[in-house]
Image: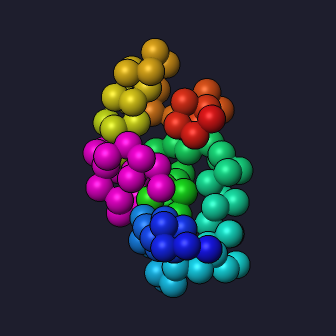
């Protein structure tokens, strides 16, 4: 594991709001798996690690709460990618975000 890997892990930990150790331990893997599960994200029903990651990816304030700024960023992303701008992160929006 080189410096680039440690840097990437630390950045990810910072983004999702977990302790920045630079080591991919259980907490980091749990965060990764929450994101890779691609849960459906709706306004007033989403918070935490997955929301912080999405906010980072969408350029919204990464506070971990799905508020009006996050909704606007999601809808803008959906429009820019030819999707229905409904503000819901479902399977199709996840596919455009992370494949």
Of residue 72 and residue 29, the one placed in the foreground of this image is 29
Residue at 50 percent across and 60 percent down: it is 47
Of residue 72 and residue 15, the one placed in the foreground of this image is 15
Q: Is residue 67 above or below residue 28?
A: above
Q: Is residue 20 above or below residue 61?
A: below
Res 27 visible: no
Magenta segment = 53-69
Q: Position of residue 19 (x, y in %)?
A: 49, 83
Residue at 61 percent across and 27 percent down: it is 92
Looking at this rendering, what residue extends furthest in the top direction?
82
Q: Is residue 96 above or below residue 66?
A: above
Q: Is residue 19 left or right of residue 29?
A: left
Looking at this rendering, what residue extends furthest in the front direction?
2
Of residue 26 and residue 23, the one placed in the foreground of this image is 23
Res 2 visible: yes
Q: Is residue 62 left or right of residue 4?
A: left
Residue at 61 percent across and 74 percent down: it is 1
Residue at 44 percent across and 59 percent down: it is 52
**Count of numbered circles in the view:** 0
Residue 65 part of the magenta segment: yes
Q: Position of residue 6 (x, y in %)?
A: 51, 74
Q: How is the image coloured?
A: rainbow
Q: Position of residue 40 (x, y in %)?
A: 62, 42
Quadrant in the picture for the C terminus:
top right
């Amino acid at each position: 594991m080189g410096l680039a890997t440690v840097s990437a892990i630390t950045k990810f930990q910072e983004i999702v709001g977990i302790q920045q150790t630079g080591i991919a331990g259980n907490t980091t893997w749990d965060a990764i798996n929450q994101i890779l599960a691609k849960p459906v994200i709706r306004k007033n029903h989403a918070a935490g690690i997955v929301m912080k990651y999405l906010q980072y990816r969408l350029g919204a304030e990464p506070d971990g709460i799905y508020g009006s700024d996050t909704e606007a960023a999601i809808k803008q992303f959906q429009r820019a990618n030819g999707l229905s701008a409904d503000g819901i992160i479902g399977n199709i929006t996840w596919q455009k975000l992370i494949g």
